[in-house]
Image: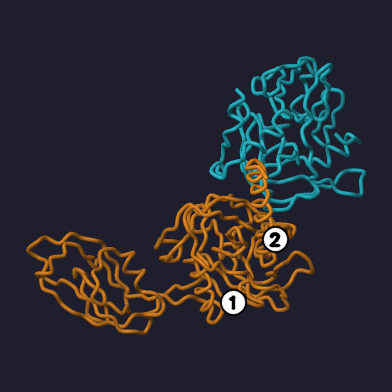
Amino acid sequence: MSSVLEAPGSRLGWVGVPPEVLERVRPGIVRVRGRGPAGAGGVVWRRDAVVTNHHVVAGARQALRVVCVDGRAHAARVVETSRRLDLALLEVPGADLAPAPIGRSARLRVGELVFAVGHPWGQPWVVTAGVVSGIGTVPVPGRAEPGSYIRSDVHLAPGNSGGPLLDARGEVVGLNAMVIGGDLAIAIPSDVVRRWLGTEP
Amino acid sequence: MTQVTDTSDSLSALSDQLADAVERAGRAVVQVNGRPRRPSSGVVYAPTLVLAAEHAIEREDELTVETASGPPLAAQLVGRDLTSDLAVLRVPGLGTEPAQVASMPARVGQFALAVGRPAGRELMASIGIVSAIGGPVRTRGGMLDQYIRTDATPYPGFSGGGLIDARGAVLGILTTGLAGGAALAVPTSLAWRLAEPLARQGYVPRGWLGIGSQPVRIPAGQQAGRGHATGLLIVELAPESPALRSGLLLGDILVTLNGQAVDDGEALQARLGGEHVGRTVVVQVLRGGTLVTVELTVGQRPGRAR
């Protein structure tokens, strides 16, 4: 199951993501499994905590598991969610996970290379590649400063939610959340996750 | 330094280069407000002149252009061409440096980024490769000599934007308006060449003979000794057309234009570029099994613009 992670699966596949770029981040990416069949992605924030999307854990609070790339599975529970930011923090009691390298999304530039790792349509550990298409902003109720989100042209499908958007260094710069119009991928910036949790990873 | 570091560094370097390319090219990419609620893009190709997508210009008044900053600038439509889906806008006071043109024509397989400024003045980009180079192709208005096809995503509002190379030089002008929404680009050399008559006289002159034709196979005994088995059967002669005036007849089989064999109508049109308007060409037709030579003066194709 883990070997797929070495096989980039999109139109930039021919560029080749150097294996060591993925190798560095790979232990920090998990699959979140609830009652549904497809599962979703998640990013290891601390040794016993994983960040994913709110919408993938909504309604499945009792029976969550996080599965590491080596196949180990751990029981997890939701400790905090934000419907507005579409973020959820899962606690994985007693686990000793490997935190993912978290990058600074504020540094992203339009046109730079990004990679998504997820489980589209339930296919595990699929890597797709593209570029940052734009940085969008949305007004946030009750705050002067607008919220931001990352737009990219990486191929996403159901099962990519909550999985990481990586930069060329293999650092997590966002959490993939949704697709607009069939081909515009939306990710929640890593800096937004950082602010929401109020902590560095 | 280990090889491992080399490859990950080179990926970062490539990533930086692509972002630099988008930034550089993006300075010459503007937002074009030429239809309700759906802005499109344009590329500054000369001082105060912008190439845009013809299909996205639905009005001539209240036509504006927006750069990354500053107020919207009033633009004037100076020319439009259905065949290439290109329009030229003049924007007085536009202080933007013209885009850098790729020194080499696009090559199949090379990196290509689609760059547009579709809404809120924000620069957007997507990546792919040059998938194919094709043409001549029949489009809304006539025959387009050449096009570039890309698999980079054309986001809504990208028409009129740039297809750029990994150094930020423009390979072509993007449009989804030429072939059923497919992401195509008019190659820079062609687009810049068409822009010149568009800016000067508002349209692109194209040669016209005024015949309708269909390809036919000519039986061995009726080739007038030429040994060439294909030609264009003339099935229509437009009123007031150069062909009619020259004495060509319905049923003639056109076999050469200026000494070169003519096998299909698209190739014939492709050989009648605007530079031929007003010039004399020599055609040969088979009439009743006999080769007849006719001189005619190429006209300007009517219905050049809306």
Which quadrant of the view contains residue A91? Answer: top right
Q: Nearer the viewer, mark 1 or mark 2?
A: 2
**Which chain is represented by orange in the image?**
B
Question: Can the viewer see residue A83?
Answer: yes
- Percent position of residue A51, x then y: 79, 30
Q: Residue at x 68, y 55 (%)?
A: B19
Q: Amino acid at mark 2?
A: Glu
The residue under label 2 is B23
A118 shown above or below B296: above
Question: Can the viewer see residue A54?
Answer: no
Which quadrant of the view contains residue B97? Answer: bottom right
- Percent position of residue A5, x then y: 61, 31
Circle 2 marks a residue in which chain?
A: B
Q: Which mark is residue B78?
A: 1
Q: Residue at x 60, y 65 (%)?
A: B57
Q: Check disc 1 and report its element: helix, strand or loop.
A: strand
| Residue situated in front as seen by the camera: B182 or A79 | A79
- Marks 1/2: CA–CA distance: 28 Å
Count residues near mark 2 (Cα–Cα under 10 Å), then give few for <14, some for 14-19, many for 20+: some
Residue B223 relative to residue B118: left or right? left
Residue B287 relative to residue B171: left or right? left
The colour of chain A is: cyan
A34 shown above or below A182: above
